[in-house]
Protein backbone atom coordinates (compact mmCIF):
# COMPACT_ATOMS: atom_id res chain seq x y z
CA UNK A 1 0.00 0.00 0.00
CA UNK A 2 2.88 2.36 0.75
CA UNK A 3 4.38 1.76 -2.70
CA UNK A 4 0.97 2.44 -4.26
CA UNK A 5 0.71 5.83 -2.51
CA UNK A 6 4.25 6.76 -3.50
CA UNK A 7 3.64 5.90 -7.17
CA UNK A 8 0.33 7.76 -7.19
CA UNK A 9 1.94 10.86 -5.68
CA UNK A 10 4.77 10.69 -8.21
CA UNK A 11 2.16 10.47 -10.97
CA UNK A 12 0.34 13.48 -9.53
CA UNK A 13 3.61 15.44 -9.44
CA UNK A 14 4.26 14.63 -13.10
CA UNK A 15 0.77 15.87 -14.00
CA UNK A 16 1.45 19.16 -12.21
CA UNK A 17 4.62 19.53 -14.30
CA UNK A 18 2.75 18.70 -17.52
CA UNK A 19 4.73 15.49 -18.03
CA UNK A 20 1.78 13.31 -18.95
CA UNK A 21 3.63 10.31 -20.42
CA UNK A 22 5.61 9.91 -17.19
CA UNK A 23 2.41 10.26 -15.17
CA UNK A 24 0.72 7.56 -17.27
CA UNK A 25 3.62 5.23 -16.46
CA UNK A 26 3.29 5.86 -12.71
CA UNK A 27 -0.48 5.39 -12.72
CA UNK A 28 -0.10 2.20 -14.76
CA UNK A 29 2.31 0.87 -12.13
CA UNK A 30 -0.28 1.69 -9.47
CA UNK A 31 -2.85 -0.36 -11.33
CA UNK A 32 -0.64 -3.42 -11.13
CA UNK A 33 -0.86 -3.10 -7.34
CA UNK A 34 -4.57 -2.25 -7.10
CA UNK A 35 -7.08 -2.53 -9.96
CA UNK A 36 -10.00 -1.25 -7.88
CA UNK A 37 -8.65 2.24 -7.02
CA UNK A 38 -10.71 4.49 -9.29
CA UNK A 39 -8.69 7.68 -8.83
CA UNK A 40 -5.65 6.32 -10.67
CA UNK A 41 -7.88 5.44 -13.63
CA UNK A 42 -9.50 8.88 -13.76
CA UNK A 43 -6.07 10.48 -13.34
CA UNK A 44 -4.62 8.39 -16.15
CA UNK A 45 -7.66 9.24 -18.28
CA UNK A 46 -6.84 12.92 -17.78
CA UNK A 47 -3.30 12.28 -18.99
CA UNK A 48 -4.55 10.39 -22.02
CA UNK A 49 -6.84 13.29 -22.88
CA UNK A 50 -3.89 15.69 -22.69
CA UNK A 51 -1.97 13.32 -24.99
CA UNK A 52 -4.91 13.11 -27.45
CA UNK A 53 -5.26 9.37 -26.73
CA UNK A 54 -9.04 9.45 -26.60
CA UNK A 55 -9.73 5.73 -26.93
CA UNK A 56 -7.44 4.95 -23.99
CA UNK A 57 -9.08 7.69 -21.92
CA UNK A 58 -12.52 6.26 -22.72
CA UNK A 59 -11.43 2.77 -21.70
CA UNK A 60 -10.13 3.98 -18.33
CA UNK A 61 -13.40 5.83 -17.69
CA UNK A 62 -15.43 2.79 -18.71
CA UNK A 63 -13.48 0.72 -16.18
CA UNK A 64 -14.19 3.21 -13.40
CA UNK A 65 -17.89 3.33 -14.23
CA UNK A 66 -18.09 -0.45 -13.95
CA UNK A 67 -16.84 -0.11 -10.36
CA UNK A 68 -18.49 3.21 -9.42
CA UNK A 69 -21.47 3.88 -11.67
CA UNK A 70 -21.87 7.46 -10.43
CA UNK A 71 -18.26 8.69 -10.65
CA UNK A 72 -18.60 12.25 -11.95
CA UNK A 73 -14.96 12.59 -13.07
CA UNK A 74 -15.24 9.40 -15.10
CA UNK A 75 -18.45 10.60 -16.79
CA UNK A 76 -16.92 14.00 -17.55
CA UNK A 77 -13.63 12.67 -18.88
CA UNK A 78 -15.39 10.00 -20.92
CA UNK A 79 -17.51 12.74 -22.50
CA UNK A 80 -14.31 14.63 -23.39
CA UNK A 81 -12.89 11.42 -24.87
CA UNK A 82 -16.01 10.90 -26.99
CA UNK A 83 -15.77 14.51 -28.14
CA UNK A 84 -12.13 14.02 -29.13
CA UNK A 85 -12.97 10.82 -31.01
CA UNK A 86 -15.75 12.62 -32.93
CA UNK A 87 -13.42 15.46 -33.93
CA UNK A 88 -10.84 12.92 -35.10
CA UNK A 89 -13.48 11.10 -37.20
CA UNK A 90 -14.55 14.36 -38.85
CA UNK A 91 -10.93 15.26 -39.63
CA UNK A 92 -10.32 11.82 -41.13
CA UNK A 93 -13.43 12.13 -43.31
CA UNK A 94 -12.05 15.35 -44.72
CA UNK A 95 -8.75 13.76 -45.81
Image (spheres, grey):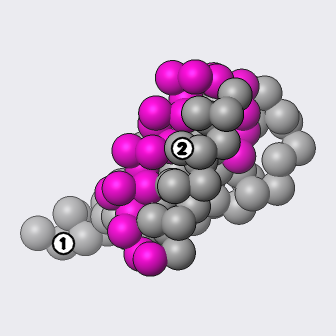
User: Can you say which quadrant of the picture contains the N terminus?
Assistant: top right
Residue 14 is one of the magenta-drawn residues: no
Q: Please give the label number shown on residue 94.
A: 1
Residue depicted at 18% across the width and 72% down the height: 94
Say which element carries label 2: helix
Q: Is the magenta stretch mostly helix, strand or loop?
A: helix
- The one nearer the camera, 15 or 71, is 15
**Closer to the camera in the image, 5 or 47:** 5
Q: In percent of the image, x 33 and y 57: which residue is there?
A: 21
Q: Which of 51 and 76 is in front in this view?
A: 51
Kindly indicate whether the residue at mark 1 contacts the one at mark 2 (C-beta within 8 angstroms): no
Question: Which residue is label 2 attached to?
Answer: 7
Identify the residue shown where x is 83% and y is 34%. 68
Disc ID at residue 4: none
SS at circle 1: loop
Tell me the residue at 37%/68% (across/down).
19
Q: In which quarter of the image is residue 38?
A: top right
The x, y position of residue 76, in whole percent, is: 71, 61
The answer to whether residue 91 of the structure is visible from this angle is yes
Spot occupied by residue 95 in the image (x, y as percentages of width and height): 11, 69
Residue 48 drawn at (x, y percent): 43, 56
* Mark 2 closeness class: few <14, some 14–19, many ≥20 residues within 10 Å: many
- Circle 1 packing at 10 Å, graded few (<14), some (14-19), many (20+), is few
Q: Name the front one of labels 2 and 1.
A: 2
Q: Which residue lies furthest to the bottom in this view?
A: 17
Residue 17 position in % (x across, y down): 44, 77
Q: In terms of sequence position, does the residue under pointer 2 or pointer 1 come before the other?
A: 2
- Residue stretch in magenta: 17-39
Amino acid sequence: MEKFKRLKNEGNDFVKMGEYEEAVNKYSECMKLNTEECTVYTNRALCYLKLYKYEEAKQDCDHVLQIEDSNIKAFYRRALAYKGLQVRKKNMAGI
